[in-house]
Image (tube, rainbow, N blue to C red):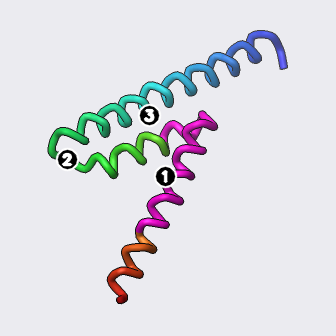
Amino acid sequence: MTQPNRLAATSMRTARRIVIGILGTTVCLIGVALLVLPGPAFVVIPAGLAILSIEYAFAKRWLDKLRRHISATMQKQRMKQGK
């Protein structure tokens, strides 16, 4: 790969990472605002984490932890309703 091609590839990766970071952070912040405003905060925040998890490992870990927590909570609810 020649120097200009390598620079272009690096620039594209960096630009992609920046766009994903800005978009994911914005969606997460809107979700946080929706915690006190009327709206589906518990849908928007995981969506923002899903966007961020495309590029960032910390967001993937948080999203996985959130999914496990939601699954456990739903399991408990099902058991309560079954009694």
Name the residue at the right extreme. 1
Give the residue at x 33% y 51%.
43
Helix, strand or loop at label 3? It is helix
The answer to whether the residues at label 2 and label 1 have Cβ atoms under 8 Å apart is no
Q: CA distance from mark 3 to mark 1?
A: 16 Å
Q: Mark 1 — residue?
A: 66
Q: Amino acid at mark 1?
A: Leu
Q: CA distance from mark 2 to mark 3?
A: 18 Å
Name the residue at the left extreme. 38
**Mark whose residue sits in front, 2 or 3:** 2
Give the residue at x 42% y 40%.
48
Q: Amino acid at mark 3?
A: Gly
Q: Which mark is residue 77?
A: none
Helix, strand or loop at label 1? It is helix
Give the residue at x 69% y 21%.
9
Q: Position of residue 4 (x, y in %)?
A: 74, 10
Q: Amino acid at mark 2?
A: Gly
- In the rendered view, does 61 fall on the left or right side of 42? right
Q: Which residues are magenta?
A: 51-73
Q: Mark 3 — residue?
A: 24
Q: Position of residue 47 (x, y in %)?
A: 41, 46
Quadrant of the image containing the C terminus: bottom left
The chief SS type of the magenta part is helix
How many C-alpha atoms fall within 10 Å of the one at disc 3: few (<14), some, or many (≥20)? many
The answer to whether the residues at label 3 and label 1 have Cβ atoms under 8 Å apart is no
The answer to whether residue 61 is magenta is: yes
Disc nearer the start of the sequence (3/1): 3
Q: Position of residue 46 (x, y in %)?
A: 42, 47
The answer to whether residue 9 is magenta is: no
Helix, strand or loop at label 2? It is loop
Q: Which mark is residue 39?
A: 2
Give the residue at x 41% y 81%.
79
